[in-house]
Image (tube, rainbow, N blue to C red):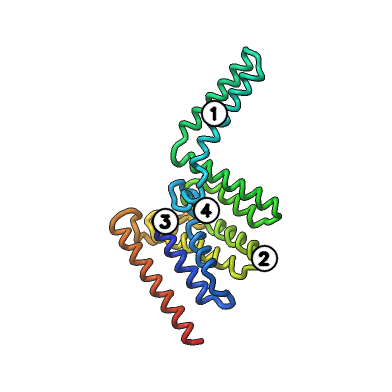
Amino acid sequence: MRGSSHLAIGLITGFAVAGLAPGIPFSLAGIALAGFSSLAPDLDHPESRLSKRLGFTQNYVRWAFAAGALTIAAYAYLQLQPGSEQRLYYTAALAFGLIGVGMQGGSTRRLALLFTGLGTVVAGLYTEQLWLSLLGTFVALAPFTSHRSWTHTIWATALWTYIGHLADQHLGWRGVALYAGTGYVSHLLADTLTKAGVRWFLPIWEYSFKVPLISTGSASGNMLEVGICVGYALLVLGLVVGSMHLV
C-alpha cells in the first residue's frame, strides 16, 4: 500500500483513539503520533515516505566522505614521508572519495538514517531517556533489513508500543503507547490487504497473512486504497459522533 494511504489510515486511527478510547484525552499531537507510527514499518524501504523525511542528512553524507578523503590526504601529505605508508593513506583517501561519489539514492539514505538513528541514541543516553535510545536504535537498524521483514511483525509492533509506554512514563503524556501502537498496527493490517501480505510472526512462522484485494501501484489498487480510506474515515467519524451523543 502507498505511503499516503498508510498515513491517512494512521491519522484516522489516531482520531479513533482520541475520540473513543476511555481515559485518553483528545490530542492533535497524539493523532500526529499515530500517523507517524503508521509510516514507521516502512523504514525498511529506502524510498518510503518516512525514510525520505528522516534521512534529511542524506545530502551531507557524500560531503562527509569527501571531507574524510581530504583529511586523510592532507594528513599523508603533511605528516608522512614519501613511501609505502604515504601511498597507503593516499589510496585510502581515494577510496573514501570514490565511495562518496558512487553512493546514490537508497544507499545514501540508509547511511543518513543510520547517522540520524545513532544521533538519537546518543541523545537518549545523554538525557537518560531509554525510549529515545530505543527509538534511535529502531531508526538506525530498520533501513538495513529486507522490506516487509522484521519491521512488519508482531514483535516490532510490541517494541514500538513499548517505546511509547516508556515515553509515556518519562514525559507524563497519557496515551502515547496507545497512539503509537495502534498507528503502527494499522500499517500491518493495511498491508495484509495487499497481494504480498504480511509475515506477522517472522521468523517463528514464515506464513504470509493476506487478503489479496490490493495490487499496490496499479490504477485499480490506488482507487481501492482511496475507497478504503474514505470508508474507514466515515466509520470512525460515525462512531465518534455516536459516542458523543451517548454522553
Q: Which residue is mark 2?
A: 169
Q: Which amino acid type corresponds to the residue marked 1 in the rendered image?
A: Phe
- The mark lying in front, picked from 4 and 1, is 1
Front residue of this view, candidates 145 and 100? 100
Give the Cα distance between marks 3 and 4: 15 Å
| Label number found at residue 151 | 4
Give the Cα distance between marks 4 and 1: 31 Å
- The mark lying in front, picked from 3 and 1, is 1
Quadrant position of residue 238: bottom left
Give the Cα distance between marks 2 and 4: 24 Å
Which residue is at a point 57% across and 24% down the rendered structure image? 92
Which residue is at a point 52% across and 39% down the rendered structure image? 60
Q: Which secondary structure lies at badge 1? A: helix
Q: Earlier in the sequence, mark 2 or mark 3?
A: 3
Q: Which residue is mark 1?
A: 96
| Label number found at residue 211 | none
Q: Which amino acid type corresponds to the residue marked 2 in the rendered image?
A: Gln
